[in-house]
Amino acid sequence: MTLNMVWFLLIAVLWTGYFVLEGFDFGVGILLPVVGRTETDRRVAINTIGPVWDGNEVWLLVAGGATFAAFPEWYASLFSGFYLALLLILVALILRGVAFEYRGKIDSDRWRRNWDIAIAVGSLVPALLWGVAFANIVQGVPLNAAHEFTGSLLTLLNPYALLGGLATLLLFTLHGAVFLTLKTTGEVHAHAAGLAKRAGVLAVVIGGAFLLWTQAAHGHGWTLAAVVVAAAALVAGTVAVGRGREGWAFVLTALAIVAVTVTLFGSLYPDVLPSSTDPAYSLTIVNAASTPYTLTIMTWVAVVFTPIVLCYQAWTFWVFRRRIGRHDIPAAAGLPAR
C-alpha cells in the first residue's frame, strides 16, 4: 500500500468521523424548532450538544487540512469549482456557531426565537449541501486538461446531486432525532422519538434510492456490500427507535452513515475528482498527490497526534454521557436563569 492510498483512506476516515459526529449536531439543530415547543425544552435540546458540537467541527478542519497537504491539486480544483457551495456552508456554520453563543444573551422571546431559526438554517444548509457536493465529486465534474473546473453552479445542481443532498439531509435529521431520544427525558424524548420514526421512513426511501443510483452508475463490485449494510442499518435503526432501543438505534444510524461514506469514497477510488469532460483529465490519488517526502512527514504526525485527539474526544463524550431533562434547566427548576 502506497502513501497515496494511505492518505486517501485517512481522508475518508476523517470525513466519516465528521459526518457521524457532526451529523447528529446538524440533526438536533434542524429539529430544534419542532422538538422543543417551549423555551425550556429547546434549552434541553441545545444542551445535549452544547459540550461537543464545536469539538465535532474539528474533524472538518482536519479533513480540509489533510486534503490540502496530501492532495493539493484535489484541494485546488475542489475549492475553485465548488466555491459558492462551500462558501454557503461556511457562512451557515459561522451563523450556527454565533447563534449557539448569542441566543441566551438577552432575555427576550423574540431574540431567542430568531437565533433558534438561525441554528436550524445553519444546520440544514450544510446537511443538504454536503450531500450535493459529495454526489458531484463521485459523479464527476467538467475539468479541462489543466484540472480547472469549467462548469457553473447550475452544473452542480443536477438530479443525482440533489438526491444526494436530500439523502444526507434526511439521514442527519434521523441521526439527530435518535441522539435526542438517547440523551433526553420527558417531553423532548417523546417528541424526538416520534420525529425519528417519520424521518426514518423518509431516510430509508430517499437514501435507498440514492445508494442504488450510486452503485448502479459509479460503484464497484465490493461497494455493493456497503450499500447493503447502509440500507439494513437504516431499516434496523428505525425499527429500534420505535421499540425504545435508543442505544442500538444510535449505533445503527451511525453505522448507516459510515456505510454511506464508504460507498461514496469506494465508488470514487482511485480518482479523487473525476472529469466528466474527458476521463484523461481526471484527478487521481497519483497525479493529485504531494511529494512522497511530504506524505511521509504527515504520516508520522498523524501517527503521533491522532490517538491523542481520539482519546480526548472519547473522554468528553464519557463525561457528558447522562440524559438531560427539564429539571436540569435552572429556570425550569425554580432557580435563577444563568
Image (tube, rainbow, N blue to C red):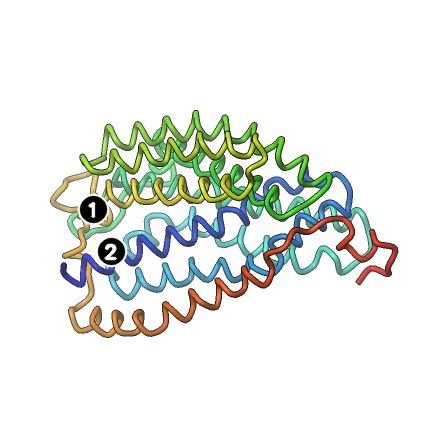
Residue 250, x across and y down, in percent: 50, 43
Q: Which mark is residue 254?
A: none
Q: CA distance from mark 1 to mark 2?
A: 9 Å
Residue type (three-letter) at the residue carrying disc 1 = Tyr
Q: Which residue is mark 2?
A: 8
Which one is nearer the viewer's eye here, 129 or 151?
A: 129
* Contact between labelled residues 2 and 1, with CB atoms less than 8 Å apart: yes
Residue type (three-letter) at the residue carrying disc 2 = Phe
Quadrant into which the N terminus falls: bottom left
Residue at horizontal 36 percent and vertical 59 percent from the top: 63
Q: Which residue is mark 1?
A: 269
**Residue 178 horizontal side relative to residue 35, left or right:** left
- Secondary element type, mark 1: loop
Residue 252, x across and y down, in percent: 44, 40
**Residue 289 horizontal side relative to residue 34, left or right:** left
Quadrant into which the C terminus falls: bottom right
